[in-house]
Structures are given as structure tokens and as C-alpha cells.
Image (cartoon, rainbow, N blue to C red):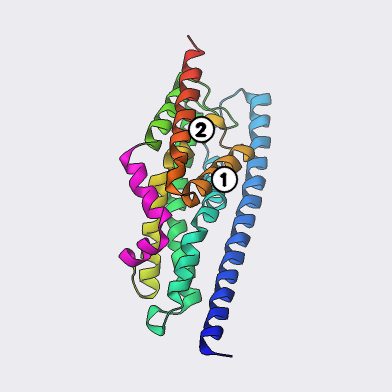
Amino acid sequence: MTNKTVTSRLHRANRTATVAALAAVTIVAWLLTMQVASTMRASSASMENGMGTATPWTSQHLWLVSAMWAAMMVGMMVPSATPMVVAFTAWASRGDKRGNQPFAVAWFVAGYLIVWVGFSLVAASIQVTLEWAGVLSGMGVISRPVLAGTVLVLAGAFQVSPWKESCLRSCRTPVGFLISEWRDGPKGAAIMGIRHGLYCLGCCWALMAVLFVVGTMSLVWMAIIAGFVLVEKIAPPWTRTRYLAAASLVAWGVWTIASTL
């Protein structure tokens, strides 16, 4: 068996192990999301039946909402990050000076998830604030059509913005990202993960805002948006998927606002 064959098999094994690990993380995240969302739905139903529609702003409620958002973001975003992580795995296995490959991959993923956990804390704070103000229902749905429609229109407009295009281009080209952003060592891997996470956040934050319209505890919509994010990143640029999303969101938003007139 030649060295080339051994190396090829090793790379395939590393790729398979990486994909399997990311799949396991995704499954666990979705299970946690379902569990926390179920707990929150039961709590919301209890509050509405006994004490009106307002949700009290307590540290326990904020913790539950934060946990749900964190698990939800991990479950939604890890699949779309898989092509980048697989590419990083291949690069990290090239030579000793690129560091210990398994640990480097773990640090890269940890850096990526730090960004989305940070976003989760911000989103959870917004959700709890809107609930406290009576703008958001216990199911995480904006109760004012004009505001909901405005969120949809703005999310649609962002889909065709230069910022979106720039961030999406970086997410779609793993090799280009690795060439321009490569750093050696565990710290370098974590920094690269954070930078990739920031690009993904720049792509997807507006789509995540749509959850406030369709329901932050809607597992169906979580899956739909997660699926679209994945397709948007792996589809060829000529498919222009973001333009289809933009047109759909703007039309939906205008219809939502017009329905109140």
C-alpha cells in the first residue's frame, strides 16, 4: 500500500469522523431544543390560564429562553457549517506544524459556536423584553401585525443587500476562507472559527429575526429556516436563492401589514 493511498484513507476517515461528530452535535441540540420548548410551552399555557397573557420577567424564564435559543442556534447552524468544518479538517491534517488535527477542529467548532451562543443571549433578551412589554405572545409570536410585517420586509430587503452578499460569498468558499484566514495552533483555530461564525451571523441574523414572526418555539419553522440556510450556502451562486427569499419575505410582510388596513 502506497503512502498516497494511506494518506487518502486517513483523510476519508477524518472527514467521516468530523461529519459524524457534527451530526451528533446537531441531533443533541435539536433534542434539547424540543425539550426546552416543550417546558416553555407548558409554562406559557399555565400562565395564560391562571394569570393572563403576560409572562413574568424572572431569572428562571430568562435562563430557559436563553437555553432554548442556544440549543436552537446550534441545531440550526451546525449543518450549514459542515462544509467549512470538513475543509478545515483536511487542512488541519496537513503536516505537524498545522497542529493536532482533532483538537484543532474542536477549537474551530468551539469558536464558531461562541458566536452563535452570544447571538442567542441577545435574542433571548429581546424575546423576554418583548414578552414583558406585551408585544410577544407566550409562543414567541409578535402580536402586532404591523410590527410583524415590518420585520418581514426588512428581513427580505437584507437578503439583497451588499452586506448579505459579501458574507454569503465568504461562507460559500471554504478554501478561499482558509487561504485568507489561516492561523496555526489552537488559538488560531478558535479565532478562525469565530471569524467564520461572524460571517455566518452576518448572513443569517435577519432570517433568525423571522422566528419572532412565525414563533420562536415553532420546530417546523426552525427546520424550514435551517434548511434554507444550508441550501443558500451550498447552492451555486447562479441559483440566486436569496432573491427568491427576498421576494417571498417582502410580499409576506406587505400582505401582513395590508391585512390590518
> Residue 88 appears at what percent x and percent y?
45, 68
- Amino acid beneath label 2: Phe
**Quadrant in which the N terminus is drawn:** bottom right
Decide: few, some or many residues near mark 2? Use Cα within 10 Å; few <14, some 14-19, many ≥20.
Answer: many
Quick one: 237 or 139, which is closer to the camera? 237
Other-residue count near label 1 (Cα within 10 Å), few / some / many at <14 / 14–19 / ≥20:
some
Q: Residue 187 lies in what quarter of the image?
A: bottom left
Q: Which amino acid, mark 1?
A: Gly
Task: For marks 2 and 1, give the CA distance.
Answer: 18 Å
The residue at which mark 2 appears reads as 212
- Please give the label number shown on residue 227: 1
- Nearest to the eye among marks 2 and 1: give it: 1
Q: Residue furthest top?
A: 261
| Quadrant position of residue 161 | top left
- In reply to whether residue 115 is colored magenta, the answer given is no
Q: Which residues are magenta?
A: 161-181
Q: Nearer the viewer, residue 80 or 109?
A: 80
Q: Secondary structure at mark 1?
A: helix
Residue pushed farthest bottom? 1
Q: Give the mark, 2 or 1, whose residue is nearer the N terminus.
A: 2
What residue is shown at x 48% (from left), y 41% (from top)?
124
Q: Is residue 177 magenta?
A: yes
